[in-house]
Amino acid sequence: MAFLFHSSAPSYADEQLSSHLSSLSTLPLSVPPTPSYATATSSHPHSDKPNKKLQSALHDLSSTKSVPREKLIEVLESLSTIPSQGAGRDGYHVEAEKSEIDGVVEAEVLGRAITMVWKEALQTLVDGALELEEERAWWDSSLNTRRGVGVYLIQTMPHRIYAALPPRSKLSRPELRAFKMPPREALFQPLRTKTSAALTAITSPLNLTRREMLASRSELTLARDDAAQRVGVLASQGPRWISEVQNGHGQQASTSSGNDIYQETARIYNILCYVLDVPVPVAPQSTSKRSKSSRASSPPSPLAAASPVSLLHLLNTHLPQAKKKIDSTLTTHKRPSALTRLWFPMLFLPPTLYVVVSAIVRNKEWMKEQVKNAKETIKGFFVQWVWEPLEGIGKTLRGGGEGLGVAPTTVKSDQESLERMVIDLGRDYYHLSGPALDALGDKVKSGDMEEVLRVYEKEMQSPVKNALMGSLIRTLLIQVQKTKTDLSLSLLSLDHLLRSQQLTFAFVGVAPSFLVLYGLGGWFRGVWRGEKRGKGRKRQYFNGVRSIERLLITAPKDTQEMSDKDRGLLIVSVSGLRTWATGLSGNNREGFMDDLRMVEDPRLTRGDKLRVVERIWRSWGAEGKRSV
C-alpha cells in the first residue's frame, strides 16, 4: 500500500543507467566493412534479418529503464549458446561466423547488457557502503560519551560471560561447583600489541570496551572506504557511449560501427573485472608511483573481450562474492542485535506489565466505559459530521434543497384577504364605489394603508365609544391582517434565500470535519513516508549534508579532480540523502533531488558544488524542513 502515498526516490545507479541506455539508443549504427582479418565472413551470405535469439535479446533489453536481474541473466544465458570465435586483433569481440548485421545487433545487445551489469555492480557497492556507513555512524554515536560505552558494556556482558565459560563438554557438576568468575582480561578481546596481557591487566573495563568499539569502527571504516573507492572507479570510468565511440577513437563520421561498441564494451568489462577483483589474462600496469593498498582508476591494458558467458560469470559469481565480503564485515563488526541491546530494559517489562494489568483489572468497568465512549465518539463523528452532511449535499444537488416550508399560495391568500377587508372598509366608512374602490385596492396591493390608518386615528379620539359602536376594532383587525401578510412575505423571501444558499451552508457545515480528516490523513501520510520520524530523520539529513560538505572542503584545492575514494564517498553520502528524500512530498522532493544531482555532476567544479551545498542549507535549513 506504500505506492498510494509515495514512490521511492530514484537511486544514482538507476539514473545513470537510464542516461547511458538513452545515449546508446540514440547512437547511430552502420554495418561496418568486413575487416581484413575476418576472411571467414566472405564465405557466408549476408542476411537482411538478424539471428532470432539476438533479435529477441535486443527486444528484451531495449528499454531505458532497469531490466530485472533475473531477466538479464535469462537473456545472457540464451546468448551464451550462440557460438563465437573470440577476440580480434584489437582486443574486442569478433563474430567471424555471423553476418555483419548479426555483429551490429550483438554489439548493441552486449553494450546494453554490460551497462546493466555495470549498474548492478554500482548499486551493490553503494548499498553495501551505505550499510557500512550506517553501522559506523552507530559506533560513532556510542563512542561520543562514557555513558554510551558503559551502556554497551552492560548490553554485551552476558555474551562476554558466556564466551568465557569452559566448553559445554566440560560443564559437569564438579566443574560447575569449582567454577569461578573468569578474570577480567578473559571478558574482552585481546589487544593487538606485544604487551596485550599487561595492558589488559592495568586498563579499566571502560577503556577496554572503548578499544573494542574503536576496533569495530576502524574495520567498518576501512571496508566502507574500500567499497567507496570501487564506487568511485565505476562512476568515473563508467560507460561513455557518445564520447568514447564517436570521438574517443578519432572518428568524425556521424555513424559508428559495431567494432567501436565492442571496444567500449571491452573497456567497461575490464573496469568491472578490475573493481570486482576478477583475474583477466592480461599483464597489469606498473604501479610504482602508487602504494600497494591503493587501486588504480583504470584497469590494465590491453583489454580483454566481453562475452555473454563472462557477463554471466560476473553476475552469478563475482558480484555475489563482493556482496558476501561486505556482509562478512557487517556480521563481524555491526552493532549488537536488538535482543542484546534491549535485554536490560526488558528486565523491567514483567513488573511494568504486572502493574499495568493490575490497574486495568481494578478499573475494568471504567476502562470499558472509556472504550465505549471512544467508539461512540468516533462513530458519531463519521456518521453525524461526515456521512450525513455529505448525504445532505447529495439530496440538495438532486432535489434543490429544503426551505422554511412557506407556501406561496398562503401568502397570496393573506394578501387577497387584506384587500377585501380594506375595500369593505372603504365602501362602508367612506361610501366609495366604482373606480374609487379599485384605486383603494391598488393602494393596498402596493402596501399603502393610509386610508385605514386615517380611520384608525379618527376612531382613537373616542376609543371606548368607537370600540363599541364604531370601526375601531375593525381597523385593528385589518392592521393585524396586514402584519400577518408582511410576515408571510418575509418568510417567503427568507425561504427563497435559504433554498438558493443551502448548498453553500452544506459545504460550510462539512468543512470542519473535512479539515480534521485532512489533518489526520496528512499526519498518517507523513508517518508512512517517514517525515514524522523525529530526531532520527533530522539527524540523517544533518549528518548527510555535513558529510558532503566536509568531502568537498577537504578535496585537493590545486586540482578540480577528486580521487576515486573521495568521489565514491560523495556518491555514497548523496545516496543516503536520496533515501532520505523518499519521505518528502512530490514538489519538495523534486527540488531537493535536483540539488543532489548537481552535487553528483562531475562537470561542476568543487567551488560550484560547495555553492549548491550552501543553497541546500539555505533552502532546507538544519532540520530538513523547507523554508520559504
Image (cartoon, rainbow, N blue to C red):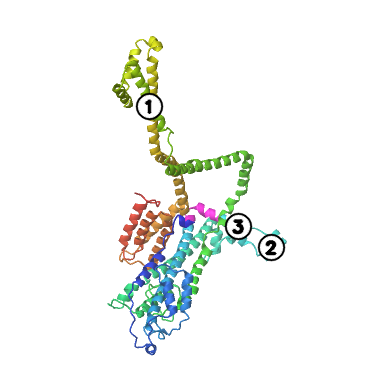
**Could you tell me residue 324's position as x and y percent?**
51, 69
- Mark yes or no: residue 498 visible: yes
Farthest residue to the front: give it: 434
Q: CA distance from mark 1 to mark 2?
A: 115 Å
Q: Nearer the viewer, residue 319 or 496?
A: 496
**Residue behind mark 3:** 158
Q: Nearer the viewer, residue 49 or 157?
A: 49
- Mark yes or no: residue 287 visible: no
Q: As displayed, is residue 254 above or below residue 591?
A: below
**Residue behind mark 1:** 416
Of circles 3 and 1, the one toward us is 1
**Could you tell me residue 225's position as x and y percent?**
43, 66
Q: Earlier in the sequence, mark 1 or mark 2?
A: 2
**Could you tell me residue 260's position as x and y percent?**
35, 79
Q: Earlier in the sequence, mark 3 or mark 2?
A: 3
> In terms of secondary structure, where does tag 3 sit?
helix
Q: Residues within 10 Å of mark 2 (few under 14, many from 20)?
A: few
Q: Looking at numbered disc 1 in the image, what kind of residue is underneath it?
A: Glu
Q: Looking at numbered disc 3 in the image, what kind of residue is underneath it?
A: Pro
Q: Which residues are magenta?
A: 140-153
**Residue behind mark 2:** 171
| Figure quadrant of residue 396 | top left
Farthest residue to the left: give it: 252
Q: Is residue 456 left or right of residue 178?
A: left
Q: Earlier in the sequence, mark 3 or mark 1?
A: 3
Q: CA distance from mark 3 to mark 2?
A: 17 Å
